Amino acid sequence: MAVAASRTRNPVLLVLILAVTGFVVSARRSDAPWAHSFTAFLKLGLLVIGVRVVLQALLSTRSQGNTILFTLPQIPLPDWAAGVKLGGDVTAEALITALYDGGQLAVMLCCVGAANALASPRRLLKSLPGALYEMGVACVVALTFAPQLVTDGRRIRAARRLRGRTRASFRTTAMPVLEGALDRSVELAAAMDSRGYGRTAQAPRAQRRLTAACVLLGLLGILLGVYALLTDSMAFPFAAGALAIGVLLAVGAMAVGRQRVSRTRYRPDPWALPEWLVVGAGVVAAGAMVTAAVRGVNGLLLAGPLVVPPVPVLPMIGVLVGLVPALVAPPLKKPTLKQAELRKAAA
């Protein structure tokens, strides 16, 4: 959906993408702490739009339109800043253009926030390739540190209230919170290590260096391909080729690197038809928008800021396909009685 949003500045399509994303999040998110991050990304998107509009109002020029809405006091600038205007006339065309540009970036941020709200970091760590087990240990410690920080903070504040101390200072509260959260995270990492997590087998030094180089090049290729697809800064064949080469290098390096890691997978996550349908829906939504952009379908980019935005059929159908995960995604697992009691106690 983020790829689809990056291909258009049509406000109708952007609002539709945001609505589809929000519906999927509301239908499939869990009660985990990270599931409420979508609201934070919505607020961040509104902040981005506000900053974009304010900067455009301060720095806009008459060349961006002739429909003057109001005039701000203009601040004279030195000669070396010729061409830059601070204040002055603010046109409707400049503000609407800033609104559309900021809205595009805000919708892309909300799509990223939807992925953060729906994806369980613990399940992602379970699917992490064996060649990246060191990164897995670091991520487990990091993901455990933040929730423990919140839990310890609530516990310490409750204890201070029971003692009649309503005013809490940073020194008396922060140190016990940080110490307790860090100790529990280190204990978790030590427990993982004592159970053989990440034990390695012997591998030649040349193989390890080749694996590291392939992983680095693969990740760079994936980064370049994704950036080119999102920003449209590179022709589509080159962007897709860089992404494909990066994926192949990364997959090959993972396959070679996992040979030096011996581990037992406990309760692996299934990958069945619902998961494939979810992935297919995202590919169809992005593919429809990219195809429309390549063919020059009318409506993706507006002829002017003050025109009525049209509603192109192909991109709209592609975006509506994004509703499929709300219907076919695997059902959420209900927490056990023990997990519910732990969450209630933490709250």
Image (spheres, grey):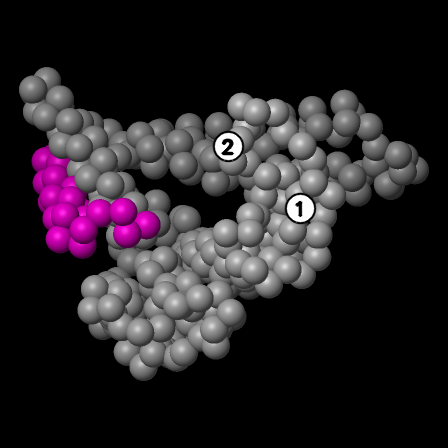
Nearest to viewer (mark 1 / mark 2) = 1
The image shows residue 106 at horizontal and vertical percentages of: 50, 56
What residue is at 42 percent from the left and 72 percent from the top? 13
Q: From what the image shows, is residue 342 above or below residue 254?
A: below
The image shows residue 346 at horizontal and vertical percentages of: 65, 50
Q: Is residue 114 left or right of residue 275?
A: right
Q: From what the image shows, is residue 253 above or below residue 99?
A: above
Instruction: Return the disc, 1 or 2, that comes first in the chain's sequence.
Output: 1
Q: Residue furthest top?
A: 205
The residue where tag 1 is placed is 88
Q: Residue furthest right?
A: 164
The residue where tag 2 is placed is 185
> Element under label 1?
strand
Q: Which residues are magenta?
A: 231-260
Hey, what amino acid is under mark 2?
Ser
Q: Residues within 10 Å of mark 1 (few under 14, many from 20)?
A: some
What residue is at 36 percent from the left and 52 percent from the top? 123
Q: CA distance from mark 1 to mark 2?
A: 55 Å
Q: From the viewer's side, name the closer residue of 101 and 147.
A: 101
Residue 118: image tag: none
Picture quadrant of residue 250: top left
Q: Is residue 46 left or right of residue 156?
A: left
Hey, what amino acid is under mark 1?
Gly
